[in-house]
Amino acid sequence: MDFSLTDEQELLVESIQEFCERYLDEKKIVEMFEAHGMSDELIKAYLEAGFGLMGIPEEQGGVPCDRVTLGLLTEEFAHHSGAITPFLNNTLAMCDMIDFGSPEQVEMCMNVYLETGKPIFSLGFSEPGAGSDNASMTAVTKKQADGTYLLNGQKTWVTQGEVFPYVLVVAKDEDPAPENRTMSMWLVPLETAGLSTAKLEKRGQQIMPFCEMYFDDVVLTEDMRVGQAGEGFGNLMKNFEMERSLIVAQCLGCAQACMDDAAKYTNERITFGKPISNYQMIQQKLTDMETALINVRNLLRYTLWKMDNGQSVRIESALLKRYGAMQCAWVCDEAVQIFAGLGYTTETRVGRIANDVRGMRIAGGTDEIMVYIAGRQLAKKYAR
């Protein structure tokens, strides 16, 4: 097993570090938290540096790369910025459109993305009663006599939903019943009559505002459909494994930033006449934190490597999401504990990072639903 990075990957890490030192130091991150967003100039700079093109097909103007490298990009940006940023979400949104959209839709979205670095749409998937249980969605479209469709329902946890001019919505076709898994995707302008939003407050990830969306007899036309009719559920499931892996990559980078700060602090903080790094309980914390980071990183790289080699990661991606998100959140919390009272103030970044990462145990599938996904498959695997 070769754990070394290629020359290109080493160069990528160096470039990320330089970019973050220039654009994403702690002072600027705090300013972004207070402003609830990033400047257009920063997002464009990320694109022009080539980072925003990685993982997008070459025929769409992107820079193809393997999944291990995409995971490294995601991890190192979180590591050197010490924050959950919208860059990953923007790339994933564009990949969804490229995978499922019509040539005209893809061209429209890519033209804007290549100019601004931002997708023109948010993702409206989750609902108050249907997070991990996608089959329980109740947002529904019903075809009218004139060939249009009426969309009714509610979406929640819509990342940057009030920022972008469109939303990519998943809704059931005709019948909202749980047993109906026939769904479609629609690209809906935010200014469409009957569509309203409400800001959703949360304790972390303030750079990326969330909102709820309400659809009250929103009129849709056939040209707003993304992908084939009735295939929305399958499309929704298609990219979850990669999304979950990259969520863990973000968690890992943030947890590494906390480890950097906490380990350094143990050499600086003096109690009873000596650095706290001399105390065995602190040493145990650092030992267990480092072990967790190594284990998560190995499982992440292994899962992405299997994807690159065309192997199924149905089990591994679920195990990674559960273990990785939980362990990284724990590392961040231990970093707060090492800083003690100082870690609970805004004088250090570990408390902010811990809040950011805590939400990742929910995003992309909760810890608990990962047990359901992996557990069923493991029972089948060992029954053979």
Image (spheres, grey):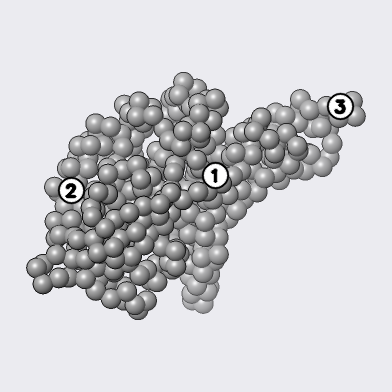
Task: Please name the residue that numbered disc 2 is placed on.
Answer: 105
Residue type beneath disc 3: Lys
Asked if one can make out residue 178 in the rendered structure from this viewpoint, the answer is yes
Counting from the top left corner in percent of width and height, residue 232 is at: 28, 63
Q: Relative to the observer, which residue lies in front, 42 or 66?
A: 42
How many discs appear? 3
Relative placement, left or right, of 319 versus 150 is: right
Instruction: Tell me if residue 141 comes above or below residue 240 in the rendering.
Output: below
- Cα–Cα span, label 3 and label 1: 35 Å
Label 3 crowd bin: few (<14), some (14–19), many (20+), radius 10 Å: few
**In what element is the residue under mark 1?**
loop
Q: Which residue is mark 1?
A: 204
Disc 1 marks which amino acid?
Answer: Gly
> How packed is label 1: few (under 14 Cα within 10 Å), some, or many (20 or more)?
many
Q: Label for residue 274? A: 3
| Dot 1 or dot 2, earlier in sequence | 2
Determine which quarter of the picture holds residue 351: top right
Q: Earlier in the sequence, mark 3 or mark 1?
A: 1
The three-letter amino acid code for the residue at tag 2 is: Gln
